[in-house]
Image (spheres, coloured by chain):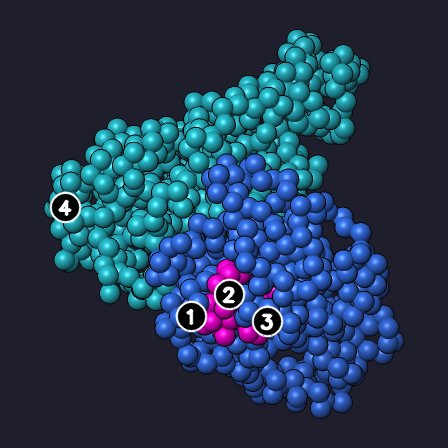
Chain colours: A blue, B cyan
């Protein structure tokens, strides 16, 4: 049986998971593939650290270039993270004719365009299934499974930490800070949680999903990104009372003159399946013009799930590597010379319904003044909920749901609203997506 | 640009959908594929019937053999259904060196083994994504996306008609007969609904899912099949009160000495995502040993969704057809000489928790007699619910949930139970799957 040789950059959580699969599930993989896969070298940070996986028979090195320059290695698997050294290493590997598998969403989102171009020049494949939604084969589903469709939009819960926090915040007495602390204790959130809770990680993944959905270049710096740190337990409770769940979604959709790419807290109607995806799980919806709405669900992180996608990519590369480039699935699902140049539009251009929450002074005529502000901007109020504030004796909590309006109009209305004497403090505004 | 020529067998719902995609979404497909696809001939039942799609430039014939013998056709797409003529036509096409795309689940489940063998001999590809769960790319996800895993089990809502009926039966006053009638009026159910409601259609699809999950030959005649016609509105209400939804699931799992393949109504805990899949939608869960549970959701039938999978298969074949057989994904995801021969076990061998509903005479000591029967068979009762019967004045409705036991044990207990004087009429028994 033929054996394909692999070199790993990194032996952390996902690296360990990859070694585990290739050691323990190889008989099943051989039944599928008719070939074998062997790890010949792994670059580690510290050669003396004890290992949780058996590395007998595998060369360990603390010089990462040993892997990308290794003469026997066919496929380099990058699991070290970061966009500096990792980029340099993969560029060297590509120039050396190695195929690449990476789980590095930041690297693909920020430098994928140039890496893919370099790979085309050198006739090698760069695969990245593990970079989006961990173990869910959503890149394959969208690039190949939905290939007969013009994709209308994609929307996903693509950060497990954020989804865990929003799920836990539904419990009585929970608030963002408390839940974040628990998430950190459980290892679901980093000591510095910015990357997850402020949506940067999700924006990396959304960048990739948008490119394979529409056939556009990767444009991470154009993604509008809003985190979940301002969502309150009140917002979650009000949303539920009104028939919604709050999810931190990445959304990519076609706009009038281009594409809209955004990550933000979102009210989703409870009857939409993705509103019921809880805890650390991920899910991506993609709507095609022929297939309609589809959804892909599973674990978005962790050793086993992420390594499952890494090894699936290795298997795909083994099947494809000796075929003519023209027959292969292009890196972004569309031929490189077919990528569209329509712009990513400003967040001001989007249209949706909005959830508005504010604190108002509990006095006569307040609702009429508030309503007048929206009426002036031609915005209808579809739903109103008011209750006494438990925190401030003379105030009331006011929640409104608007009709579908342009973001620029709602911003204008909220600016006027903020100037009313009756408004006490900040106004919360959350977008609503019906995902129909 | 290169053009691949396709011949269609059948121009019904899915045939029309396929023509629509290839006429109207071809620019997007060309951006992905770098090649074009042209339908050159379609076999129809009646040449004089008016068409819902534009067939200008396409030869129409009422001789199906014109398609499979057409010298220019590279790929034959079979959308006529049935297992007689369709089989003969595909065998001819394969011998003529044509690649095959089919949406025919019965044909693959019942004759796939011989068709795949013939295709191997003739070095052509047989693809069948549309045969399971319509527009959901679940065959691709399992055969390729989860290729790094040993699949532990698969469970799916794979018949939209059945799921529609069970969903509608949750509404007050609905019962099976009434809802079936509405489903027939809406076109969701056939005039003779046996195929859908008695689980035969689901059994065809489960046969295929089991084979690609475990790498076993197709064994349709070994699938245990139980329909939904005996599920009452009471069962659905009791299940919900106890924290479950009733779904008609196809389940394929590993058993002690083989595999278990079965289709039956199933209680699924509400917090499992698939319990929330409603209406005509389909969803398939697959659990891999590394990835854990994943789920694939979307429309399981209809022109657009089914044709979406048909055309995705055409695109895949175009990419693969000139590559060496050894590099291609095998028809069942595993090399033909690697298919396992472990047996499909009898339904008596499975182990699960059970929901039991019966009518008992409302008199002292009944519960104690019933409990004694279960205790004798070493079965624990985890949950009991009793309420007066609204239909029979002196009777009570008794619902029990058991612990996990062997099906043969529960059958023994239910036989003893049926002999008690206190039991009035039939006993309903529904399996419970936690899908953890």
Q: What residue does disc 1 label?
A: A121
Q: Chain of mark 3?
A: A
**Lower position in the chain sequence, tag 1 or tag 3:** 3
| Range drawn in magenta | A95-119
Separation (CA) of disc 1 from disc 3: 17 Å
User: Residue B346: x percent and y percent?
Assistant: 55, 19
Front in this rendered view, residue A240 or A209: A209
Q: What residue does disc 2 label?
A: A96
User: Residue B308: x percent and y percent?
Assistant: 37, 53
Q: Are marks 4 and 1 on the same chain?
A: no
**Lower position in the chain sequence, tag 3 or tag 2:** 3
Separation (CA) of disc 4 from disc 1: 38 Å
**Lower position in the chain sequence, tag 1 or tag 2:** 2
**Of helix, strand and loop, which one carries label 2?**
loop
- Asked whether residue A56 is drawn in magenta, I would say no
Bin the neighbour count of mark 2 within 10 Å (Cα to Cα): few under 14, some 14-19, many 20 and up: some
- Give the residue displayed 44% in from the left and 59% down from the top: A143
């Amino acid at each position: 049986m033929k054996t394909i040789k692999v070199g790993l950059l990194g032996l952390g959580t996902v690296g360990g998971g990859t070694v585990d699969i290739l050691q323990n599930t190889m008989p099943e993989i051989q039944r599928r593939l008719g070939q074998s896969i062997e790890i010949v070298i792994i670059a580690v940070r510290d050669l003396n650290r004890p290992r949780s996986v058996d590395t007998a028979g595998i060369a360990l090195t603390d010089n990462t270039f040993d892997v990308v320059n290794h003469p026997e290695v066919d496929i380099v698997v990058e699991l070290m993270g970061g966009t500096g050294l990792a980029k340099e290493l993969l560029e060297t590997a590509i120039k050396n004719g190695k195929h690449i598998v990476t789980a590095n969403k930041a690297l693909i989102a920020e430098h994928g365009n140039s890496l893919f171009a370099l790979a085309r020049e050198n006739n090698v494949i760069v695969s990245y299934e593990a970079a989006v939604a961990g173990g869910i084969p959503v890149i394959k589903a969208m690039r190949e499974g939905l290939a007969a469709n013009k994709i209308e939009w994609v929307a996903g819960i693509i950060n497990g930490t954020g989804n865990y926090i929003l799920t836990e915040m539904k419990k009585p007495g929970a608030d963002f800070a408390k839940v974040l602390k628990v998430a950190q204790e459980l290892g679901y959130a980093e000591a510095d949680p910015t990357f997850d809770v402020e949506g940067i990680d999700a924006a990396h993944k959304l960048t990739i999903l948008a490119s394979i959905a529409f056939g556009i270049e990767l444009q991470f710096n154009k993604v509008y990104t809003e985190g979940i740190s301002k969502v309150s337990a009140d917002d979650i409770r009000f949303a539920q009372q009104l028939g919604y769940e709050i999810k931190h979604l990445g959304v990519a959709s076609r706009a009038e003159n281009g594409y809209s790419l955004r990550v933000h807290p979102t009210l989703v109607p409870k009857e939409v399946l993705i509103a019921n995806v809880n805890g650390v799980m991920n899910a991506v919806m993609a709507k095609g013009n022929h297939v309609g709405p589809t959804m892909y669900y599973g674990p978005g992180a962790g050793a086993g799930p992420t390594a499952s996608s890494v090894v699936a990519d290795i298997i795909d590369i083994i099947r494809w590597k000796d075929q003519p480039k023209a027959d292969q699935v292009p890196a972004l699902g569309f031929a490189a010379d077919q990528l569209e140049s329509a712009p990513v539009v400003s967040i001001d251009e989007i249209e949706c319904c909005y959830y508005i929450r504010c604190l108002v002074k509990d006095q006569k005529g307040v609702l009429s003044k508030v309503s007048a502000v929206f009426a002036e901007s031609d915005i209808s109020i579809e739903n109103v909920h008011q209750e006494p504030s438990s925190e401030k004796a003379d105030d009331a909590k006011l929640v409104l749901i608007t009709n579908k309006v342009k973001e620029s109009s709602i911003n204008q209305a909220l600016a006027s609203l903020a100037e009313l004497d009756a408004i006490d403090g900040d106004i919360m505004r959350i977008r609503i997506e019906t995902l129909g």
